[in-house]
């Protein structure tokens, strides 16, 4: 039975909850060979992480229960081993890295100590462990590793922290590395670096890598084979290329067609219209730190302007300044000729109706203690001039239907909805004010790809019907491509480039924009292979 | 998530709110028992003194420290008699009024004042926050018993003054908790969403902040209840709280202390009343927290479905 490195056979896991038994995975089988990367692809709730948790003994039992199946590693069934035997395997022979490196690093110890701890825990003398730690930190390309070894986690950037997690996982030269959404929390350029580091390390050590992800781009970039999961079952397996180009199962087809960045680009609106919003030299300081530096842009009525940038580029701060959640340091933002930055608060109150915002995370932006009706009708309560009270109920019903929900959902609370539905509620709340401009701050980033596409479709439909303008803030370039009229690229608080969407995507002028384009992952494994080659060449020529 | 949705779809539209509340109370048997006990205490506090005043104060020197569980005696002597032969059960019922007045009054006052100040400190200007927090520091750094002694030395001891003194000393607990919670909750996105809609500070505080922080404060308040009862008894013991022949549970405990080795029941029964009341409040507060939280409420509703 030693032909596969690890093999999962007919695994079924149930979770017993107060609402009945949930079959998290049913009859799942897959295997991983030496030197191979297997991706498990699925949306949230598909059970893609469950089999990895079963391997690592991370399923809480109860409420979890493994009802059938085997996990064969070295010819032995992991599920039948004692917990002390499994502890020996965990960390040393099978290692795992997680999505959010900050919450998996202990803030009160230095990173060097934490990496060394893995080795000392498995019986290595402290001196030797420290030398090896330094080696590892250099290997994962932490700059100035000699000095950084005694730094604390908060002193590293997100990408560096993920590298440290990788160093930690590799400390004992595992045979298998399980990476659970390793790059989801990272910026695109950093994501590309981390993935190529993982590939390099794999080539070096010949370990098998299990990559759990929701992102077809990550699959295309890194995976040899892919397992597609949907509601607890494997719907399709094959090489990354096969699955992308000749998907067989309808679910896989749907998933691939939902990936943004392949459709037709929108033409820019005719010029010569009076802009609805005109920002001139807007600047925001936080103490000595310049978050937004001299930003100027315009938004026309009925137009979608996308602001794209990585974390820390100042795109969210710009939005907050426009809504006066933060006060601008200098500059102006003219809304139909009136300056939002200096406007007195009573005028601003009336204007709130015209400019609304949809937030990134609908779980947090809806008050968990209010019903959907209360959430939406709060707009009418705050602005009594919108609608007399007897009509509230009808209007809420209309709004819910407008965003694709049912009127009977009115009396439910936010937690009873899925992420995509919650975002629809947030959009309905914004629409209740009958706004002319909606600022969407990463409004779909927290959603699954297919849900993303639905919400974007909804936004486009609403724009056609109601002629609203969007200021769409995102870090995801392909998403913006299908949807925006114009794109504004921000970096370090400055606007580096702006123009019609076709110009930015087909003919970017600035190096930063080009880099951002190159770092984005295409869902097509062949294109991604080309890009990888191009990147490698670029690297060689620069050296 | 989808699973949860399907489930709630089955539950369908809610029946009348009162009926539903009662049904949710029926599901949680501990909370139900607590509610029944508290109802008894409440009735004792309201009607006890009017009905039993005479019985409770009548001394009977032959029945001094009469032991409990002598069922040949009239019912009010079943828990025994105190050092002057007064029936303990009757005295506990009568004392419920003063005890409840002081404890409930003090806890509610400090809860209301502390929460209000804490929310102001947490939500409005830095200046207001500084002033309020330093005020809280002053109260906290001053030994509460000393403060009580000084104030009650100047003012005549009465239920009302006792409430004021106890409330002042307990304010910082609520103030600091609510301020800390507000500082956290105000940064949440739904508060920002409300701001974007143009909601006033008052609306944000009462509609968005208060419902989120209230469960924590109510839990603290129920725990504080026992503390207030005991502090009140300490003050009464020092002779500056409630004065005999007025009685409270705390006073009864401290009066019985001298006889602990020979007649344990003098202190035990009123002590038990304090414990049970606090425990009941705690259980009921726990239930209330679940019942008021839309995310948690299904725990009580699901049970209804299964057995109903």
Image (tube, coloured by chain):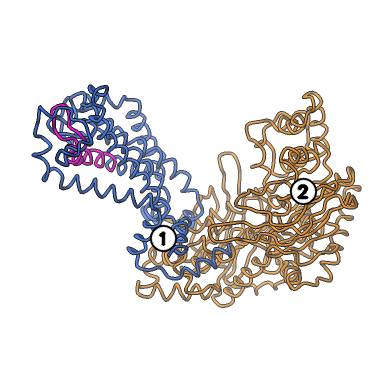
Chain colours: A orange, B blue
Q: Quadrant of the C terminus of chain B?
A: bottom left
- Residue A272's place in the image compared with A166, above or below, is below
- Residue A196's place in the image compared with B90, above or below, is below
Indicate left or right for B128 with A418 as reference: left
The location of residue B191, given as percent across then percent down, is 46, 54
Residue A309 is covered by the magenta coloring: no
Magenta span: chief secondary structure: helix
What is the number of the mark on residue A225? none
Dot 2, crowdedness within 10 Å: few (<14), some or many (≥20)?
many
Q: Does the image show residue A509?
A: no
Nearer the viewer's eye, disc 1 or disc 2?
2
Q: Quadrant of residue B307?
A: bottom left
- First in residue order: circle 1 vs circle 2: 2
How many badges with numbers are in the image? 2
Q: Quadrant of the N terminus of chain B?
A: bottom right
Q: Quadrant of residue A150?
A: top right
Q: Nearer the viewer, residue B259 or A416?
A: B259
SS at badge 1: helix
Q: Quadrant of residue A280?
A: bottom right
Q: Nearer the viewer, residue A446 or A206?
A: A206
The location of residue A484, given as percent across then percent down, is 66, 67
SS at badge 2: strand
- Chain of the residue where label 2 is placed in the rendered structure: A
- Residue B108's place in the image compared with B304, above or below, is above
Q: Does the image show residue A334?
A: yes
- Residue A361's place in the image compared with B230, above or below, is below
The location of residue B210, given as percent across then percent down, is 39, 50
The location of residue B246, given as percent across then percent down, is 14, 33
Q: Which residue is mark 2?
A: A178
- Chain of the residue where label 1 is placed in the rendered structure: A
Residues in magenta, as a range: B79-108
Q: Which residue is mark 1?
A: A347
């Amino acid at each position: 039975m030693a032909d596969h490195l690890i093999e999962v056979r007919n695994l079924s896991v149930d979770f017993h909850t107060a609402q009945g038994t949930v079959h998290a995975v049913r009859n799942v089988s897959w295997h991983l060979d030496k030197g191979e990367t297997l991706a498990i692809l699925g949306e949230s709730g598909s059970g893609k992480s469950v089999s990895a948790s079963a391997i690592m003994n991370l399923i809480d039992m109860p409420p979890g229960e493994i009802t059938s199946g085997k996990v064969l590693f070295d010819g032995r069934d992991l599920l039948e081993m004692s917990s002390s035997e499994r502890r020996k395997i965990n960390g040393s022979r099978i290692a795992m890295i997680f999505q959010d490196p900050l919450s998996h690093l202990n803030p009160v110890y230095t990173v060097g100590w934490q990496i060394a701890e893995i080795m000392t825990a498995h019986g290595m003398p402290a001196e030797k462990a420290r030398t090896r730690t330094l080696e590892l930190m250099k290997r994962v390309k932490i700059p100035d590793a000699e000095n950084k070894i005694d730094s604390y986690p908060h002193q590293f950037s997100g990408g560096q922290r993920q590298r440290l997690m990788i160093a930690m996982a590799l400390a004992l030269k595992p045979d298998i590395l399980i990476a659970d959404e390793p790059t989801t929390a990272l910026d695109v350029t950093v994501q590309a670096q981390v993935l190529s580091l993982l590939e390099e390390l794999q080539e070096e050590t010949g370990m098998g890598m299990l990559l759990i992800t929701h992102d077809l781009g990550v699959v295309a970039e890194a995976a040899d084979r892919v397992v597609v999961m949907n509601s607890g079952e494997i719907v399709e397996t094959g090489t990354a290329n096969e699955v992308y180009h000749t998907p067989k199962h309808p679910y896989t087809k749907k998933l691939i067609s939902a990936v943004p960045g392949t459709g037709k680009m929108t033409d820019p609106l005719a010029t010569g219209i009076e802009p609805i919003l005109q920002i001139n030299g807007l600047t925001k300081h936080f103490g000595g730190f310049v978050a937004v530096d001299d930003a100027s842009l315009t938004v026309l009525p009925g137009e979608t302007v996308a602001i794209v940038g990585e974390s820390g580029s100042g795109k969210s701060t710009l939005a907050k300044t426009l809504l006066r959640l933060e006060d601008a340091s200098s500059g102006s933002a003219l809304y139909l000729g009136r300056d939002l930055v200096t406007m007195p608060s009573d005028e601003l109150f009336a204007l709130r109706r015209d400019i609304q915002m949809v937030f990134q995370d609908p779980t947090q932006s809806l008050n968990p203690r209010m019903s959907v009706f209360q959430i939406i009708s709060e707009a009418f309560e705050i602005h009594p001039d919108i609608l007399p009270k007897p009509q509230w109920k009808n209007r809420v019903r209309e709004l819910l239907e407008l965003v694709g929900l049912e009127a009977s959902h009115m009396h439910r609370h936010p937690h009873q909805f899925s992420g995509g539905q919650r975002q629809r509620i947030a959009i309905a709340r914004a629409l209740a004010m009958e706004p002319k401009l909606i600022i969407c701050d990463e409004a779909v980033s927290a959603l699954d790809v297919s849900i993303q596409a639905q919400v974007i479709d909804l936004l486009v439909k609403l724009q056609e019907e109601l002629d609203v303008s969007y200021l769409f803030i995102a870090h995801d370039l392909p998403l913006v491509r299908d949807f925006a009229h114009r794109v504004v690229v921000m970096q370090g608080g400055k606007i580096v480039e702006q123009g019609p969407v076709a110009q930015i995507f087909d003919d970017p002028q600035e190096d930063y924009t080009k880099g951002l384009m190159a770092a984005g992952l295409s869902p097509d494994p062949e294109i991604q292979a080309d890009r990888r080659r191009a990147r490698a060449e670029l690297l060689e020529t620069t050296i | 998530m989808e699973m949860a949705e399907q489930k709630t779809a089955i539950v369908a539209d809610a029946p009348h709110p009162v009926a539903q509340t009662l049904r949710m109370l029926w599901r949680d048997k501990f909370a139900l028992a607590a509610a029944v006990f508290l109802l008894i205490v409440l009735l004792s506090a309201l009607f006890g003194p009017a009905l039993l005043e005479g019985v409770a104060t009548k001394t009977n020197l032959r029945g001094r420290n009469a032991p409990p569980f002598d069922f040949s005696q009239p019912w009010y002597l079943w828990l025994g008699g105190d050092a002057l032969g007064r029936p303990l059960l009757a005295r506990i019922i009568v004392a419920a009024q003063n005890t409840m007045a002081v404890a409930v009054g003090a806890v509610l006052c400090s809860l209301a004042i502390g929460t209000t100040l804490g929310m102001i400190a947490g939500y409005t200007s830095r200046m207001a926050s500084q002033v309020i927090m330093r005020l809280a520091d002053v109260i906290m750094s001053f030994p509460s018993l000393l403060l009580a002694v000084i104030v009650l030395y100047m003012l005549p001891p009465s239920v009302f003054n006792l409430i004021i003194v106890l409330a002042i000393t307990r304010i910082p607990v609520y103030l600091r908790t609510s301020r800390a919670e507000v500082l956290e909750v105000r940064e949440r996105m739904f508060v920002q969403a409300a701001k974007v809609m143009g909601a006033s500070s008052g609306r944000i505080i009462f509609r968005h902040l208060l419902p989120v922080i209230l469960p924590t404060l109510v839990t603290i308040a129920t725990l504080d209840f026992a503390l207030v009862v005991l502090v009140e008894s300490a003050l009464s013991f020092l002779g500056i709280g409630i004065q005999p022949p007025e009685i409270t549970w705390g006073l009864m405990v401290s009066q019985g202390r001298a006889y602990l080795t020979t007649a344990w029941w003098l202190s035990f029964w009123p002590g038990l009343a304090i414990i049970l009341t606090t425990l009941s409040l705690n259980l009921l507060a726990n239930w209330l927290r679940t019942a008021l939280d839309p995310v948690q409420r299904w725990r009580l509703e699901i049970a209804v479905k299964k057995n109903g």
